[in-house]
Amino acid sequence: MQPFTQHTGLAVVLDNANVDTDQIIPKQFLSKVTRDGFGVHLFHDWRYLDDAGEIPNPDFVLNQPRFSGASVLLAGENFGCGSSREHAPWALADYGLRVIIASSFADIFYGNAINNGLLPVALSELQLQQLMDEVMAVQGAVVTVDLAAQRVYSPAGHRFEFDIAASAKHKLLNGLDAVGQTLSLVQQITDYEQHIPHWRR
């Protein structure tokens, strides 16, 4: 998993609350057995006017030229609600997004995002609205997110601080998924196993 320290990228506003995992990646696209290839189906029912995904919806934000290549998504409250499918952060990351900023997240989605190198940032509703307003006001607006400092910098230079658990921050900064985190503790695990009394083995 790629380490996340700081990211500056074009921001896009999806001003919807309660965006659920079936809207992020519809169930009919979950047959793949790897994490790759889900980005083309991200927000499928909103991005396309047809089931085959061949006719883009010109009104959907990700299809608008000014947001082409966006890597920071601003969304409403309770982002990622619904099912526990890990495919949702896979699709967001495969599309090219590195950061999701919302006023709140569904708990399971939040954990899945961190486990897959996608940074979820929770800001207050007022901070989020200010950030959205700045992004919509200027074409090509970029947002910087500094994980080490736990700060978001708006296009106009305003600074917003955010909270993140120390364990989650450590995983992202070091590019550790669940397996990588376990492997980083191999020596401690080995030492523990070697000192287990024989009667407990």
Image (tube, rainbow, N blue to C red):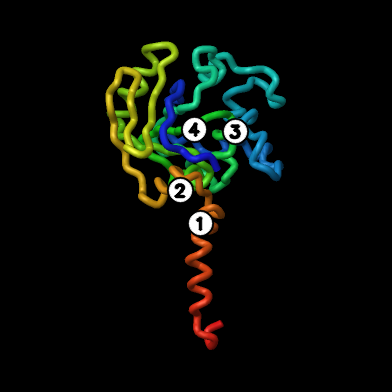
Label 3 sits on a secondary structure element that is helix
Label drawn at residue 94: 3
According to the picture, the residue beneath numbered tag 1 turns out to be 184
Q: Which amino acid does the dot numbered 4 rest on?
A: Arg
Q: Which numbered mark, 4 or 2, is in the foreground of this view?
A: 2
Label 1 sits on a secondary structure element that is loop
Q: Which numbered mark, 2 or 1, is in the foreground of this view?
A: 1
Instruction: Confirm or deny contact between disc 3 and disc 1 (CB under 8 A).
Output: no
Distance CA(mark 3)–CA(mark 1): 26 Å
Residue 92: percent from left, percent from top: 55, 33
Mark 4 crowdedness (10 Å alpha carbons): few <14, some 14-19, many ≥20: many
Label drawn at residue 98: 4
Label 4 sits on a secondary structure element that is loop
Mark 3 crowdedness (10 Å alpha carbons): few <14, some 14-19, many ≥20: some
| Of pointers 3 and 1, the one earlier in the residue sequence | 3
Mark 1 crowdedness (10 Å alpha carbons): few <14, some 14-19, many ≥20: few
Distance CA(mark 2)–CA(mark 1): 11 Å
| Of pointers 4 and 2, the one earlier in the residue sequence | 4
| Of pointers 2 and 1, the one earlier in the residue sequence | 2
Residue 189: percent from left, percent from top: 51, 67
